[in-house]
Image (tube, rainbow, N blue to C red):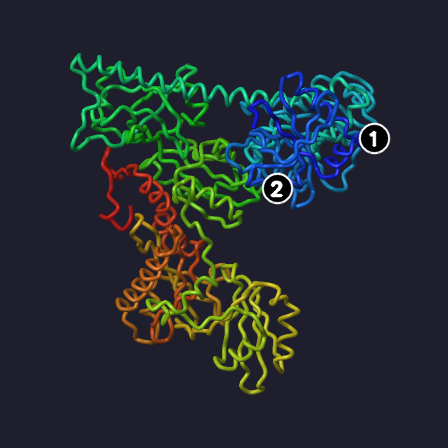
Amino acid sequence: MDEKSIGIILPNRQWNRLAHEELTEDDSFVFQYAIAGEELNLNILFFNLEELQVNERKGNAMMIKDEEIVSLGFIEIPSIIYNPTNYHRKKNNRTIFELAQQTGITLINEKTNIKNKVFLDLMATHPALKDVNLVTMNQNLTSVSIYVLGQKHCDHQWDTPFIYAKKDDEVLPFKEAYLLLTDNLLMLEETKEYLFEVSHQILEILHYYYPRIYEIGLQFVFMKNGEIRIQSTCPILTIVKDISDSNQKVAGTILKWPIELAKEIMDLNNDDQSMHTNNGKTEANVQESNVELHHDNITPFVKKSSPHFENVWVKFKVFHDNEMKMKLPDRLTENWREQPEIVKFGVNEETCHFDIYEDAIPLRHNSYQDPVELFVSDALVKLMHLPVDLVYQIQFSERKAIIGPTIGFLLGEKNHVYNLDYMEKFNDRFGKYHRYGGVTIAFSASSVDWEKRIAYGMIYDPVKKHWRYDSTPIPSTIYRRNFHQKKGDIRQLVELTDNHLYNSYHFKKSDLYLLKNNPEIKQHLPATILLDNMEELINFVIENGKVILKPVSLSRGRGIFIVELDSETEGFNLFDYRNMTKVEHRLKDKENLQALLEEMGIFDQEYLFQTYIPLLKVNNRSLDVRVVMQKYNKRKWQCSGIECRVAREDEDLTNIARGGEAMTLETVIKSSTQGLNFSLVYRNILNLCQRFCRIMDQKNEHFAEFGIDIALDEHGFPWILEANIYPSFKGFKTLDYDTYLKIRTQPMFYAVQIQGFQILDEDAYGNTIRFHERAFL
């Protein structure tokens, strides 16, 4: 594809009108794009959205040349694509999203508008916008709205170049609308300044949730009491349509802007390629320079059999330089085996020039509290998205300087629900941050720039102990604690991190059912069947007497039913646990049972049913056991904590969320009336959980944490009820807070460990703990 080509996506109807030369007045902007392209010496190619072959990188295209419409047929998609249209059909939005994920393609505007409820929820939950007034229902609005246009440049800085108003459907200059409402112009400039200031606040936050939005309108409304409130966003073409009649020149400028942006992106990409080429030449000069240093008896690249400083704790200081540069004291180079040429941060690698200077810095007490100061160019900081206010470790290995550790919390797809307040509940995971350092970013896959492999989200500030909006490369290791993501996104992240996304698969109750024939654990699995037809369920209840129904995808006791055979009436009792209060239904026959289950929508969901295990009881209260198994290195699972969950009286379910009480296993076993041996029960539970985790390691997935629910029957025999990949730790929090904190911290240690960085001992400078030496770090 010609490097001077820009693609513009059109919806099917508009494409057809262009193909048949039947464009309406509303389609005139298409010609404006073509004119802008000619002025910038670019080819503007129009693609039909519904005929895009995203994976093949091809699409049906046309161009306008000398005012003639030329059909090009199916051609390769250019590397820069502009989307000006707001789509409502899921199919179209899915195509746009898939296009945004393609490596080597930059998409300008994955969205051009945000759903109103999503937008207002986002505004309402952000501390930074607490002073911004939002429109709510039943408020006294005037008929005057104000529109502010936002445009984002390559450096992610927003401009707000245009503001106007509308009264009903009439477009007005802002000044005229303001005078109409206030009868004076005393506060005109102050009001305009306020609107621009609030708009910038909103746009900067939107960038971290929707990084591929480059232009969008913000709609404010005047209230009858004189207030101005934010109401919604609006698509760019709505703004163009509004102002075309009154100011063609401004409309033309707005339409030309994305073409100028595309040209700017194209030039930057070309500059990056040139820089990489030049850096390659620079590295050759560095090697030559080091030969000269060697003659002065300085030997920074001598291979050592046992290097003393594999990892160095560092703090970065920025200096101005347009090239990728890092300045290092020669003390760090003593054990280099070869000259580094590349800097790696997260999954991104870039060629870098390393300058060595003489400085006998002390490394004996090098640690988080005593890092070495390294100098990096602002070009490196910008390109690598490197937050420089944190303490890192740096490794020199295989011609690379690796900065880390970089850890990601993968959030759900609906990223607008995550904000700085929401992230506060993750803070207790960072009590040991001083032992490993680096950067941790919480992000959603929908906020990733897949082309540049940059994650936009919130990073943890260990000094201020709160979160802030920021960006980093996609982290080297990702901890998945949410399972509402697209499978394609997970596959990409697994590939980019070299399978260092852990909890990569959402292990569900139905997956446990698939292990029913595994010889290592089959005798510890209650008979389980996926609910397919009523007759099978009825026969199972008649055979077993009491059966529990569970939704495949829910946890924490949600959506559960118990069905038991009534031996006196030969009918059935159905116990509904969907709400906090248990509801009992007495049914005279299987037809009534089926009718009730159908009414409750059970057959519209994915359910399974299994034998009800007569649970061991303490003080006549049912109990089960939650075992937290966590990875300590890639091959070693360890139990991080065990709690017993004891149900309320007259309650079958033990979940803490349903009012269950957490107790220690030892207390429960010794309080039971069965005369069980605590040590034997404890060993049997741990052995079973270890066997289960070993089986999981044989799968083609990366698991690092399970909450395994064990039922102990009246003889103390352990049964695996569930294995939760997203376990709750509420019981530990009240039962043993130290254990709770260790459970919360261990995934962070594991993320550091598989990246190969140090974890310092709690009470020592520069001493690392080896994972095989201790159960807890």
State the quadrant of the C terminus.
Answer: top left
Mark 2 → mark 1, Cα distance in angstroms: 33 Å
| Residue sitting at x 34%, y 58% | 693
Q: Residue furthest bottom?
A: 568
First-in-chain label (2 vs 1): 2
Q: Viewer-nearest of labels 2 and 1?
A: 2
Question: Mark 1 falls on what kind of element?
Answer: loop
State the image coordinates of residue 749 (x, y, percent, origin top left).
33, 43
Residue shown at 31%/54% (left/top)? 637
From the viewer's perspective, is residue 334 above or below residue 526? above
- Location of residue 309 in the rendering, given as x and y in whole percent from the top left corner: 22, 30
Q: Is residue 436 visible?
A: yes
The label on residue 95 is: 2
Residue 191 can be seen in this image: no
Residue, x 43% and y 15% (percent of image)?
322
**Could you tell whether 356 is left or right of 235 in the image?**
left
Amino acid identity at mark 2: Thr
Residue 771 or 196: which is nearer the viewer? 771
Horizontal arrangement in the rendering, residue 50 relative to residue 716 (left or right): right
- Residue 517 placement: quadrant: bottom left
Per the image, label 2 sits on a secondary structure element best described as helix
Q: Which residue is mark 1?
A: 169
On-image quarter of the N terminus: top right
* Dot 2 alpha-carbon crowd within 10 angstroms: few under 14, some 14 to 19, many 20 or more: some
Up the image or down, 117 lies above or below 735; here it is above
x and y percentages locating residue 187 in the rendered image:
73, 18
Q: Position of residue 486 (x, y in %)?
A: 53, 47
Residue type pointed to by label 1: Asp
